[in-house]
Image (cartoon, rainbow, N blue to C red):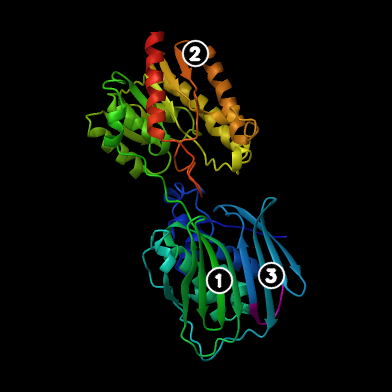
Amino acid sequence: MTAHRFTDEGQQLFASLSGDSNPLHIDPVAARRTLFGETVVHGINGVLWALDACLGKRTGRWRLQRLKATFDHPIGVGSTVTAEVTEADETRIRLFTGNNPVQQIICEMVPGGEDEEGLSIADEKPSPAPCAAPSLSETASASGTVSLGFERQIAEQLFPAVCGALPAWQIAILLATTRIVGMKCPGLHSIFHSVSLDFDSPGSAAAVLAYKTTRADERFSRIDVEVTGPGVTGMLVTFYRPPPVVQPALSEIQPAVPSGAFAGQRALVIGGSRGLGEVTAKALAAGGAALRLTYHQGDEDALRVCGECHTVGADAKCFRYDVTAPADSLESSLDDGFRPTHLYYFATPRIHLRDHGENSDAPFPTFATAYVEGFRRTVEAAFKVSGGRLSAFYPSSVLIDDERSRNSEYAKAKLAGEEMCRNLEKEHPGLSILAPRLQKLRTDQTVGFGADTAADPVSAMVGELTAFAESIKEQA
């Protein structure tokens, strides 16, 4: 099998080549808030690499007659992909990450792929354009054209065999499909599911690819886009990706928080820039706590949360912290004299559970690094800085109680985290830890297609935080 690692540098080059600069593919901070939780490789990047691997074993010029590609699962940037090629009447290529199939490509090629004299494909980058962000309903009437052109030097660097074998106009059409999906329709919130193209002689038609939505099914967030151009007709099947979850502003949370409920707390919120950590930080500030919140990526989000906390007079600062780093990185970041009395822990990798939570894309060690070892290191560092008395909040999960979900890697890691909580309490007198099993709450990690079954995080978290504060008072 041929193998290739898709790198950040390669992603930037492909975005420049294709004109598809959707943040999902090139911006780790923005991509972390999508349902994928990370930057992912353009589907057409995978197709062109697969064709390159296939054509690298052939000689002469070739022309595509038909191509169909299905993008079954995303390829995370940094992943190594292998190609399995089967040659018969048609060429079948399957791409894998590890043992997991991620793309299927079927194509028919015939010898003789010379460029057409009557069709001029510009040797230049696509003109920069903003990433359109239509609503799902607005995509129903979407139509337009994109120019056909690409910079040969970049293409030859990424796909030398493709550039040596296929006509430029066919390469340009493949690149234009990802620009349509990622930048036009559906645009910002797109998922490219499949592409089906039939090729003929291009003649002397204008060097543009036209697109038009033929189906927009809001029940399934599916959008079918027809494309036509010189020597090509086809269909792009796409989905409208759920936008990132915007948590309520502090001003909306404040009425739900009892006055002074958290007064006197010096709270350290790990992962307080978004999701449940963001809701927790705002609720604590509304209840009178002083705050230090951390972020792993996305300082703008963390600074925004701190800014909202300042509007109610809270002492709030933020700093970057990686729970997998040595413990002294936390101590050095708290060198302003802040001695935490409370720790709230929301560090998490991408979860992305499937139906009933029985499977996840991440293995147990990935979850355990954050939920067990990362928690232990963080608690021990915070306990040292606190002066020997600390109350910690560890959010566990109700999936542990669900027969269909308890064997998932995620649930097993959360259960191991609960055991770590008990061990830490035994090892450190003066440390108390509450580990409630939370229901599914609405965050970037839980949003998906179809009906939203996640509960409101504000009412749930304010209730948990208030109960936590009351239990600590009873112990004192």
Q: Which residues are magenta?
A: 56-65
Q: Residue at x 26, y 35 (%)?
A: 251
Give the CA separation, mark 1 to mark 3: 24 Å
Marks 2,1: beta carbons within 8 A: no
Which label's residue is closer to the chain start, 2 or 1?
Answer: 1
Question: Please, is residue 281 above or below residue 114 in the view?
Answer: above
For mark 2, give the secondary structure.
loop
Q: State which mark lies toward you, 2 or 1.
A: 1
Q: Amino acid at mark 3?
A: Cys
Tell me the quadrant of the picture where the N terminus can be found: bottom right
Q: Residue at x 55, y 43 (%)?
A: 352
For mark 3, give the secondary structure.
helix
Which label's residue is closer to the chain start, 2 or 3?
Answer: 3
- Crowding near pointer 3: few (<14 within 10 Å), some, many (20+)? many
Location of mark 2 (residue) = 428
Q: Is residue 224 left or right of residue 404?
A: left
| Residue 21 part of the magenta segment | no
**Disc marking residue 54:** 3
Q: Main secondary structure of the magenta part?
A: loop
Tell me the quadrant of the picture where the C terminus can be found: top left
Question: Please, is residue 157 above or below residue 280 in the view?
Answer: below
Q: Residue at x 42, y 72 (%)?
A: 143
Q: Amino acid at mark 1?
A: Met
Location of mark 1 (residue) = 235
**Disc marking residue 132:** none
For mark 1, give the secondary structure.
strand
